[in-house]
Amino acid sequence: MARTKHKARVAGGEGGAGPTAQPGAAGAAQGAAAAAGQAADGGPSTSGRLPDNLELARTRVVCGPDMNLHTTSTIAATQWASLGVDASFDLDSFRRGFNIDITRYEGDDMEFEMKGVSCALANSLRRIMISEAPTMAIEHVFIVNNTSVIQDEVLAHRLGLIPLKVDPRLFQYKSKEESPSEHNTIVLKLKVECRRLPNGSMENECVYSRDLQWLPLGSEMPDETSCRFASSQEALVPGGVRPVHDDILIAKMRPGQVIELECHCIKGVGDEHAKWSPVATTWYRLMPEVVLLQQPHGDVARALAEQLPGLLALQGTGDAATVTVGDVRKHDKLLEKVRRLSGEEQYKQYIQLRKIKDHFIFTIESTGAWRPHELFNYAVSVMMSKCDKVLEGLQAFPQRSF
């Protein structure tokens, strides 16, 4: 049978107060912080003292039973000028209030808390990690033989979405006009045939990502692919190139069926196609806060402790019974119940769910090409370079008085 060759381009769709505080304690903390020009939660500072209702609106989202209140973040320096309060950015206050605390790091997943920044900055870092951090991914598939039931285009798409364990910083971007070389292209080979063994079992019935073989010397059919390496990539990539996961199913075959192809991987970013995105996902949420608006006693305290076991701890007995708020992070599943109870007539004067506007719980799930902390550091460096460009652009305009 004559060997047939054709090229398939990979395509596909794109993929304030502390966490738990009594009103009196929160007010005292906010008052002391305001006197120093800093928010009690270590967030954006203000020069002067805001009324309690405005301070609440500035630093918290109030999660009501039917709707959320105070969901906007104010950045205008003159927002409270009529009250004699300066809300302009202060670098020293930012340095005092900013903090990052890693709470979980397991394999390619990392969770950390970031305090003292606006949601605009947090979201910018998230978007950079998703769409601007580069990886290597399969871009072209040269199919020599495919007698499986999977169409060539579908097979190429499945291959393109396999994450590769290789540092993209070792390679250059490849333009459409450039020829493939050892500096901008990685070549992988897949050659699998399904056969029935004498004992009746089948060999290579399932084709997995581990069947992809790295070709450090480049393409084995350079005349067809125009890919010629001047030297081996073994010195450039000492650890080799392999899929992040060995058990990703590519295809299923029956005896006599064959898949033989060559994959060419190039460097790209998720902004162009989701296959280059280095994260499965990355997201953040605001730090929740359960606040006792006033201390419940007696039967009400016991009822609340029964409704929210673990989150609220009962203290004392009889009519002197009270409750204290525990660690909110350990009782995430009860927070929606707190929201519901805050709308019920017998409890709404006692308990409220809030979220701190400048305290984020960030989660990064890497696909494996980058370590999560490396991704975050890279996103920060990209953000800094963007800020530098803005400053350069502003300096190019002559200063004038309006």
Image (cartoon, grey):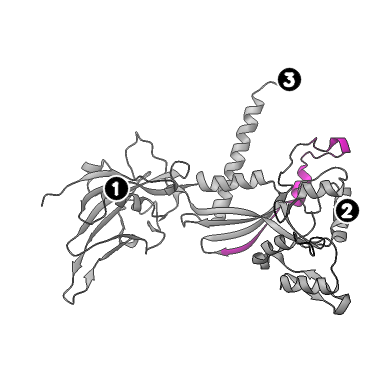
Of the two numbered discs 2 and 3 in the rendering, the one whose residue sits closer to the viewer: 2
Which of the two discs, 2 and 3, labels the residue nearer the N terminus? 2
So how many labels did they put on this image?
Answer: 3
How far, Cα to Cα, is label 3 from label 1? 58 Å
Please give the range of residues in magenta.
77-105
Q: Tell me the residue at 60%/44% (across/down).
A: 124
Q: Which residue was labeled with disc 2?
A: 32
Whether residue 199 is visible to the viewer of this picture, yes or no, is: yes
Q: Quadrant of residue 328?
A: bottom right
Relative to 2, residue 173 above or below: above
Of the two numbered discs 1 and 2 in the rendering, the one whose residue sits closer to the viewer: 1
- Towards the viewer: 317 or 288: 317
Which of the two discs, 1 and 2, labels the residue nearer the N terminus? 2
Q: Which residue was labeled with disc 1?
A: 153
Alpha-carbon neighbours of circle 3 within 10 Å: few (<14), some, or many (≥20)?
few
Which quarter of the figure is the C terminus placed in?
A: top right
Q: Tell me the residue at 61%/53% (across/down).
A: 284
Of the two numbered discs 3 and 1 in the rendering, the one whose residue sits closer to the viewer: 1
Q: Which residue was labeled with disc 3?
A: 400
How far, Cα to Cα, is label 1 from label 2? 65 Å
Q: Quadrant of residue 184?
A: top left
Secondary structure beneath dot 2 equals: helix
How far, Cα to Cα, is label 2 from label 3? 40 Å
In the image, farthest residue toward the bottom: 317
- Towards the viewer: 30 or 263: 30
